[in-house]
Image (cartoon, grey):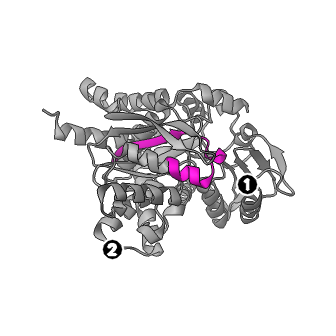
Amino acid sequence: MATQTIAAAINPWHVAQQQFDLAAVHLNLSPGLRKVLREPKRELTVHFPVKMDDGTVEVFTGYRVQHNLSRGPAKGGIRYHQDVTLDEVKALAMWMTWKCAVVGIPFGGGKGGVRVDPKKLSLREVEGLTRRFTTEISILIAPDRDIPAPDVNTNAQTMAWMMDTYSMNVGYTAPAVVTGKPVALGGSEGRTEATGRGVVYSIVEAARHLDMDLGKCRVAVQGFGNVGGVSARLIAAEGATVVGLSDWMGAIYRPQGLDVDAVLAWVQEHRTVMGFPGAREITNGELLELDCDILIPAALETQITAANAGKIRARMIAEAANGPTTPEADEILHKNGRFVIPDILCNAGGVTVSYFEWVQDLERDFWNIGHVNEKLREVMTKAFASTLEMSLKQEVSMRTAAYMLAVQRVADATSVRGLYP
C-alpha cells in the first residue's frame, strides 16, 4: 500500500519530461526542438453522458492526446481506470512516440483514457461508454490519423465496439481504425500475447548479454493482467522459476516456484491471485523487493521510486509496464548495478504487432502466427542490439540509450519536415 501511495503522489508527465530532458542534453538538441518535442501536439478532453442499467445518467471524463506526428499517424492505447488523469495520458502519449521510434515503426505517439472503474459497470454499460467515447474522439481518430488499441482494462472486445462505432459513423467498415481487434474483424494473430512475448524476447537478449542462465533465474512479476500473465507464462517456458506474482488485490510468493498455469486458472475462477494454495500472501511493495534475479513490473506507472529502489535485489528489471520507474529511482538502480530494460524498448512488442495488424488490414493480406512472431522477434532483437550498442558506446544506462535513439529519430523527422507555415 505504501508503494501505491507514493506512486499516486508522483506526476507521470513530469517523469516523462525529465526523461526527455536528459536525452536532449546528451544529444545536444537545439532549444527550439526541445520546446517542440517536450509538449503534446493535441490534447482533447471530453465529458460525455452514459445511460446506466437502472435508467440513471452518469457523466464520464475522457481524454485523447497526440504527442508527435512527425513520423506517422498517432498510435496508442485506450485505458479505463478510476485514476486516469490528463497528465497521465500526456505522459503515456509521449512514451508511445519514443516507443515507436526506438523499434523503427512509422507511427507517432498517442494515448487515451476514461476515468472510470469498469469493474463497477455491467458489460452493457461498458459497451455504452465505449461507443459514446469513440464518437466523442472521432474528430481525431482515423486509419491514417490516429489508431487506438487496448490498454489497461480494455481488450479485443472494446476495440471491436470502437471499430464498429467508427464504421457506423463514416458509413463503411474501417478495420484499420483500431488495432488489437478480434481476429474475426481483421485482428492479427499473436496480438494478444505480443507485449508479453516482446518482454520475454528482450529478457532473453539481456540474459545473453549478462551471461545469466534463465534456467537458474528466479522471477517476480508485478501485475497479472494480460501483459504480466503472458510474460510470466513465457518466461517460465524459457526455464525460469516464477517465485512471485501480484495483481490489484495483493501478491503471492513461493520461493520454490509457482505453477503459472495453475495460478492463471485460479484467477479465472477467483478474479485474484490472492488465496492461491501453497503460496504466502505479501504486498505489492514487498514483491518488488523479493530476493530474485529478474523483476518484471507489469502494473501501473511510478512503482519503483527513490523510496524503494535501493531495496530492489533483482539483477535485471524488465519494464513490461509504462513508466514504472522514476528518474530518481533510475539513478539508484544504475548506481547499484541493476540492468534495466526500459519500457519504451521492453514492452514495445504490443505496438509492433499493432503495426503489423494495421498493415494487414490496409493490404487485406493476413499473416499466420509463425510469421508474426518471427517478425516480432526480428524487430525486438534488432532494437535491443541497437540500444545496447548505444549504451556501451556512450557509457549511459539502457534507458538513456533508448531515449537517445528514439528522440534523435523523431528530432530528425521533425527537423527535415520543418515548421509550417
To which residue does mark 1 refer?
Answer: 271
Observer able to see residue 382: no
Q: CA distance from mark 1 to mark 2?
A: 37 Å
Q: Which residues are magenta?
A: 108-129
Disc nearer the start of the sequence (1/2): 1
> Which percent across, then down, holds residue 129?
51, 47
* Observer-nearest of 136 and 316: 136
> Which percent across, then down, holds residue 128?
51, 50
Q: Residues within 10 Å of mark 2 (few under 14, many from 20)?
A: few
To which residue does mark 2 refer?
Answer: 365
> Which percent across, then down, holds residue 140?
32, 44
Identified by mark 2, the residue type is Asp
Identified by mark 1, the residue type is Arg
Q: Is 70 a magenta residue?
A: no
Q: How many marks?
A: 2
Residue in view at x 20 percent, y 37 percent: 415
Quadrant of the drawing holding the C terminus? top left
Q: Determine whether the residue tagged by mark 1 lies in a helix, strand or loop.
A: loop
Q: Is residue 160 above or below residue 18?
A: below
In the picture, measured across the screen, residue 37 lies left or right of residue 370, that is left
